[in-house]
Amino acid sequence: MLEALGYPFFQRALLAGLLVSLLSGLLSPLVVQRRLSFLGDGLAHAAFAGVALGLFLRGEPLWLALPFTFLVAMAITFVREKTELSEDTAIGVFFALSVALGAVFLSKARGYVGDAMGYLFGSLLAVGPADLWAMALLLLLALFLLPLWGPLAYATFDRELALSDRVPVVFHDYLLSGFLAVSLVLAVKVVGIILVAAFLVIPGAAARLLSSTFTGLTFLSLLLASFSMVLGLFLSFLLDWPSGASIVLLQAGLFGLAFVKTVFSVRK
């Protein structure tokens, strides 16, 4: 492990991982309690389309994936708010559209298909200084949004009552969707497109099994996300596994332990 810390690429990946885990750990309770897991999948596939577009245009994939995924998140929220369609239906439409567009762009990005593998499964070598600055900026923005945590939690547990109390629930919905989109795209280089949605779900799901309060759930989610990220990156380096797979497998193991503890606690 000490040997791994001597490599600059691993240092960048570890710092990026910690920044991403703080973001995902903070957002995961909202994703779990609001049942937005499918939204994470939809936005991950939107990120795939954006990355494929970047490869096709010979540009920086994530800088094109960022606005593309953000627009898809806004479109999903808009369709959900303005129509009687259920949220999973709106997500399903843009999910399919994103996959179709991604397939078309990737088929035209000749000579760059191999580059897509690092984005699909995550790569320690892919994290650069610009990515670290972007993640740090987003985390700083998240700190400024902390005063909204109370209203967001309020609407999460009782949306109708929050609306009656004139909480700007719809605006918060757009804000949360946009923040999820940006966080997800920035996590792609470490976790990978295929597994990044799980990174927004599993810490909150495991914490939900262990805590009965939203505050406790949030702190546990942050702890589990950070722990699994750090240990997962070390396992990735030592075992030569994709970083995203290592992190998510460790998260799944922690969820399994939380599940076992819950089952035995109920039996007692």
Image: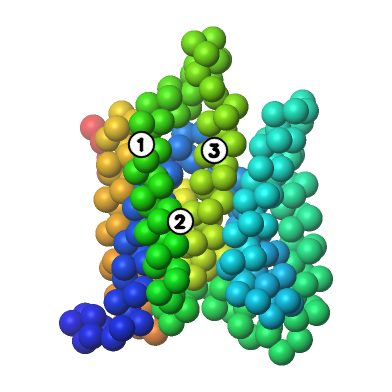
| Whole-number angstrom distance, CA of label 1 to CA of label 3 | 13 Å
Q: Earlier in the sequence, mark 1 or mark 3?
A: 1
Identify the image quadrant of the N terminus: bottom left
Q: Earlier in the sequence, mark 1 or mark 2?
A: 1
Front disc: 1 or 2: 1
Secondary element type, mark 2: helix
Q: Position of residue 143 (x, y in %)?
A: 34, 43
| Whole-number angstrom distance, CA of label 2 to CA of label 3 | 20 Å
- Is 112 left or right of 1, judged from the image as shown? right
Residue where numbered disc 2 is placed = 199
Amino acid identity at mark 1? Leu
Q: Is residue 159 above or below residue 238?
A: above
Residue beneath the point at 49% across and 54% down: 183
Q: Nearer the viewer, residue 94 or 183?
A: 183
| Crowdedness near tag 3: few (<14), some (14–19) or many (≥20) residues, C-alpha within 10 Å | some
Q: Quadrant of residue 210?
A: top left
Secondary element type, mark 3: helix
Residue where numbered disc 1 is placed = 146
Secondary element type, mark 1: helix
Residue where numbered disc 3 is placed = 175
Q: Earlier in the sequence, mark 2 or mark 3?
A: 3
Camera sees residue 202: no
Q: Position of residue 24 (x, y in %)?
A: 41, 51
Amino acid identity at mark 3? Leu
Residue beneath the point at 63% across and 85% down: 114
Q: Quadrant of residue 243?
A: bottom left
- Is 3 left or right of 42, judged from the image as shown? left
Residue beneath the point at 60% across and 59% down: 66
